Amino acid sequence: QVQLVESGGGLVPPGGSLRLSCAASKFLFRDTPMSWYRQATGKAREMVAWISEDGARATLADSVKGRATISRVEATNTLYLQMNKLRPEDTAMYYCYADWFEVWGRGTQVTVSS
């Protein structure tokens, strides 16, 4: 069974940083591109970042460009999202997604507030 487990969310003040993690199990992590999505209350889920299966290519949503980095570590089957200079509008549930397997994690909540 494919499983994705996010962690690292929390309450941070504006301007703060967080590193989100997504641990993958029971599937070949190296064989699929991975993505981070987020969904704020009352809004549609949106893609935040994407990384290719080999980690050579990555894209970021305009809303986080210059403030976020997506990365992956094959040895530990872990996907990361480093977010800096956080803003209140970054408040959302963050999900990781295994593109080729179409599997979602359960999410980790990020709240940016003073």
Image (cartoon, rainbow, N blue to C red):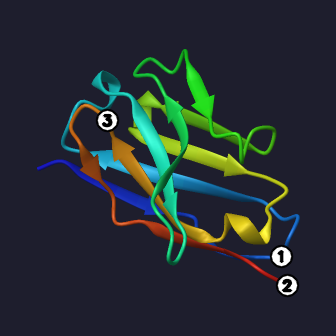
- From this viewpoint, which residue is outermost toward the right? 15
Q: Along the horizontal axis of the image, is 21 left or right of 85?
A: left
Residue type at mark 1: give it: Pro
Residue 99, which numbered label? Answer: 3
Give the mark nearer the N terminus: 1 vs 2: 1
Give the mark nearer the N terminus: 3 vs 1: 1
Mark 1–mark 2 contact, CB under 8 Å? Answer: yes
What secondary structure is marked by label 2?
Answer: loop
Q: Relative to residue 22, is residue 111 depicted above or below?
A: below
What secondary structure is marked by label 1?
Answer: loop
Q: Relative to residue 45, is residue 98 depicted above or below?
A: above
Looking at the rendered structure, the number of numbered marks drawn on it comes to 3
Coordinates of residue 92 in the picture (x, y in percent) = 57, 69
The residue that disc 2 covers is 114
Cα separation, mark 3 vs mark 1, equals 31 Å
Residue 13, which numbered label? Answer: 1
Residue type at mark 2: give it: Ser
Considering depth in this image, is 16 or 41 the residue closer to the camera? 41
Coordinates of residue 35 in the picture (x, y in percent) = 45, 40
Residue type at mark 3: give it: Asp
Considering depth in this image, is 60 or 28 the residue closer to the camera? 60
Residue 78, which numbered label? Answer: none
Considering depth in this image, is 28 or 81 the residue closer to the camera? 81
Q: Along the horizontal axis of the image, is 70 left or right of 97?
A: right
- From this viewpoint, which residue is outermost toward the front? 43
